[in-house]
Image (spheres, rainbow, N blue to C red):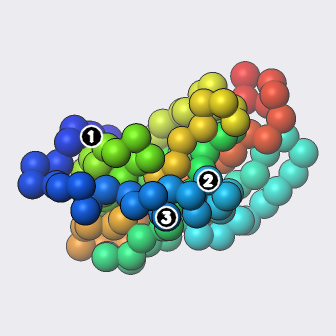
Amino acid sequence: FRLSGGVPGMSAQDRLTPTEVERGRTNDRIGTQLVQSAPGFSVWHIRLQPGETLPAHRHDRPYLWTVLSDGKARTRRDDGTVAEVSYRAGDTCHHAPLSPETAFVHDLTNIGLAELVFVTIEFTQEGSHS
């Protein structure tokens, strides 16, 4: 995947609002559908049509994602950054370590022309992602 740093032309109004950040801190739905939950992990699907947004949510546990479709998205984070990301089917990223102390909030908007599909695995117990 290719991350484009700060998005040119983005202003303060394009960032997550304080209300979105607060809602995101209590939103642990990291996908559009929880497909399996078992001791040690949860599996989520994310399916976003063009223009659709996965609302702000928190990541406070290690996780990894794999994108199943080519596409482009914009993500806004609670630290004020806004980035555009280009994905190719098969791109995978592991985010570790995360904890309640190192958690972050972000949203994800499909800014491409086709459905954007991810599988995300969140590790819910220490050591289950080693």
**Label 3 crowd (10 A; few <14 / some 14-19 / many >=20):** few
Residue type at numbered disc 2: Arg
Give the spatial CA distance, label 2 vs label 1.
24 Å
Three-letter amino acid code at the position of disc 3 = Thr
Q: Which residue is mark 1?
A: 3
Whole-percent x and y of residue 65? 54, 46
- Location of residue 112 with respect to 84 vertically, above or below: below
Callout 2: SS: helix
Give the mark, 3 or 2, whose residue is nearer the N terminus.
3
The image quadrant that residue 11 belongs to is bottom left
Q: Position of residue 107 (x, y in %)?
A: 45, 58
Q: With 44 as the anchor, is 39 left or right in this view?
A: right
In the displayed structure, 126 sits above or below 118; it is above
Q: Residue 10's x, y, as percent?
A: 16, 55
Picture residue at 34% right of the left edge, 45% below the top = 80
- Give the spatial CA distance, label 3 vs label 1: 26 Å
The local crowd at label 2, few if under 14, some if 14 to 19, many if 20 or more residues have their Cα within 10 Å, is some
Q: Residue at x 25, y 62 (%)?
A: 13
List x then y, in percent, for residue 101: 66, 30
SS at badge 3: helix
Residue that mark 3 sits on: 19
Number of the label disc, if any, that sits on residue 25 = 2
In the rendered view, does 37 fall on the left or right side of 24?
A: right
> Tags 3 and 2 in contact by the CB under 8 Å rule?
no
Image quadrant containing the N terminus: top left
In which quadrant of the rendered image does the C terminus lie? Answer: top right
Q: Residue at x 72, y 29 (%)?
A: 129
Q: Residues within 10 Å of mark 1 (few under 14, many from 20)?
A: few
Residue occupying the point 61% across, 45% down = 59
Q: Answer with mark 3 or mark 1, whichever residue precedes in sequence.
A: 1
Q: Nearer the viewer, mark 3 or mark 1?
A: 3
